Image: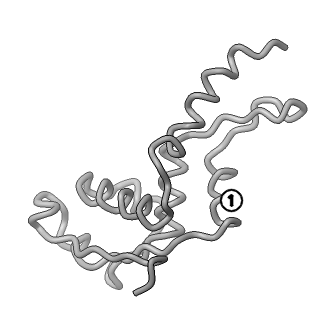
Amino acid sequence: MSSREFEVEITKEIAPYAPEEELGVYKATRWTWRQKQEAVIKASNILDEEKGLMEMNLVDFQVQQMLVCVKPPKKLEWNEQRINELDTDIGDTLLALCHKVNGTTVSERTDFLKRSASIKDIPG
């Protein structure tokens, strides 16, 4: 397994309240630059096209990242709805796996929140 791919086995010890079908081995593969840009677009709303201002929903971005990067156990259908309904312990574990495989730092994951706050300060 390369450094571009990590896997984790989700067991009842990790996710005691998860449904049985969500347990198993998940793999995360590093996304491409284009996949990341498409996730940003899908998770964003344009506020002002002329000024190039947009607002990104962090949860939608994380869902898109998991959709692109995570390969679930074969028995599990993988789509946005499934990710939205994942057991919280599984979701948190898989999101951490995505951050590990993509090498994102805490500041990268929260940087847009700081920028969004400053949007209010822009006149016009």
- Horizontal relation, residue 11 to residue 40: left or right: left
Residue 38 in picture, x, y percent from top left: 68, 59
Callout count: 1
Residue 37 in picture, x, y percent from top left: 69, 57
**Residue for point 52% across, 60% down:** 65
**Residue for point 77% across, 16% down:** 122
**Residue for point 50% across, 41% down:** 107
Q: Quadrant of residue 12?
A: bottom left
Image quarter where the N terminus lies is: bottom left
What amino acid type should be assigned to the residue bearing mark 1? Glu
Residue 12's place in the image compared with 25, above or below, is: above
Image quarter where the C terminus lies is: top right
- Horizontal relation, residue 4 to residue 91: left or right: right
Query: For mark 1, what is the residue?
Result: 38
Residue 103's place in the image compared with 120, above or below, is: below
Residue 123 in picture, x, y percent from top left: 81, 12
**Residue for point 54% across, 68% down:** 68
